[in-house]
Image (tube, rainbow, N blue to C red):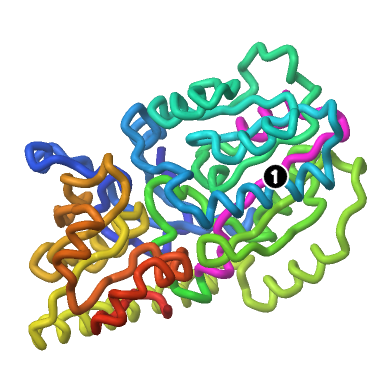
Amino acid sequence: MQNKSNIFMTFGKMPIANNFINKENFKDEYFFEMSVAFDEKKSLFQLANFPKPTQMFNENYKFFTNSSKYMINHFENYSNELSKEFLNNKSKVIEIGCNDGTLINFFNSKGFDCLGFEPSKNVADLAKKKGLNIITDFFGPNFEEKNFKKQTNLICAANVICHIPDLENLIKGIDYFLSDDGIFVFEEPYLGSMFEKVSYDQIYDEHIFMFSISSINKIFDLFDFQLVDVLPQVTHGGSMRYVIGRKNKHKKSEIISKYLDEEQKKKLDTIESCLDFKKACELSKKMTLEKLNKFKADNKKICGYAATAKSTTVLNYCDIGNDIIDYICDTTNEKIGKFSPGTHIPIVSMNYFKKNIPDIAFLFAWNHKEEIFLKEKKFVENGGTWFSHVAL
């Protein structure tokens, strides 16, 4: 699928971000041109090209929600807040893109009637093992779930809606399942935060859209829904929680117009801010490479910390390979022993990191820095230095 209108930047050839591969698969690795565009009518930042969803979400998906204690705690709080504000003891809850069931399990344990959608079979199977009601498929309006059709009080999602290329079909699915006065709540990395931090690693194959409040307001207005409330979140280096309801069914928060005014001042609703971001990305790339090359010139040993999907963008955009970074350490068994997408840096266990301590650790999971810094105090105590392409 392609949308070549308003393309303002390309990050070059990019592999599937979560496709950590074996050596024998190097020659067959898939790449696509990762260009970004801006739709001024919807104020929407988006990928111009991207792989088919089944190439990203399948039986070999390598991201697990429960890999971060911080995110587990966040989702417990998320479920508590939504339960208190929107649900009663007879409520029905759907989660879109429930991964290993971490979030929906919190609703399930409260006694709500729950249903999860997850297209990646391996993580959906983990959710099913928890006794959860899971449909291993992409969310949409084409399911005969009579118990939930037009009866669902809450549809929720976290870091998922930006993955869905067909927003019209998504909203038709919400309309299909949501009760008359039901609420759709979702969280996503926020465009304003990405621009501010120059965290261009938020852009990769799965992140088809980077939403602003302006874009969400405009998109849902087209389908007889309205933005009811927005709540900033600290997750993923700056996210936004959006609360959506059918038009004229819920009181609209006054804070929305304040945020929309702020976005207008920052030109987030126009392509101007995108062009500034492009310049900032190019400068960030230049400075990152200069710093890494200086470390190498000083005979510093450099490793990567956390084999994230986001790291794929940084490594490939900046052309950072095994000649600069010796290895990337990670906790996910499915990644250990494999190689980073595109740049083919070996992925090793945390034990290897502890036994082969480098001078510099390039922190790819910078959005989890508090949790990681706490866990890795000894690295700094032993003279190690953290580094990232964003300010730590």
Q: Residue visible at 66% across and 47% down? A: 186
Quarter of image, res 55: top left
x and y percent of residue 89 in the render?
84, 30
Q: Is residue 366 above or below residue 120?
A: below
Please name whichever residue, 48 or 86, is drawn nearer the observer in this view of the structure.
Answer: 86
Report the residue marked by disc 1.
Answer: 79
Q: Residues within 10 Å of mark 1 (few under 14, many from 20)?
A: many
Instruction: Please state the extent of the stretch shown in magenta in the rendering.
Output: 169-194
x and y percent of residue 83 in the render?
78, 42
Q: Is residue 138 above or below residue 217?
A: above
| Res 220 visible | yes
How many numbered marks are there?
Answer: 1
x and y percent of residue 299 in the render?
8, 83
Position of the C terminus, as image quadrant, is bottom left
Q: Residue visible at 33% across and 81% down? A: 283
Query: Does 225 sit left or right of 350 as displayed?
Result: right
Q: Residue visible at 76% across and 27% down? A: 92
Please name whichever residue, 293 or 265, is drawn nearer the observer in this view of the structure.
Answer: 293
x and y percent of residue 137 in the render?
50, 23
| Res 137 visible | no
Query: Does 34 sit left or right of 163 as displayed?
Result: left
Please name whichever residue, 105 or 16, is drawn nearer the observer in this view of the structure.
Answer: 105
Q: What amino acid type should be assigned to the residue bearing mark 1?
A: Ser
Element at label 1: helix
Q: Is residue 12 above or below residue 56?
A: below
Query: Does 343 sit left or right of 209 as displayed?
Result: left
Position of the N terminus, as image quadrant, is top left
Residue 336 is one of the magenta-drawn residues: no
Residue 174 is one of the magenta-drawn residues: yes
Q: Residue visible at 78% across and 51% down? A: 227
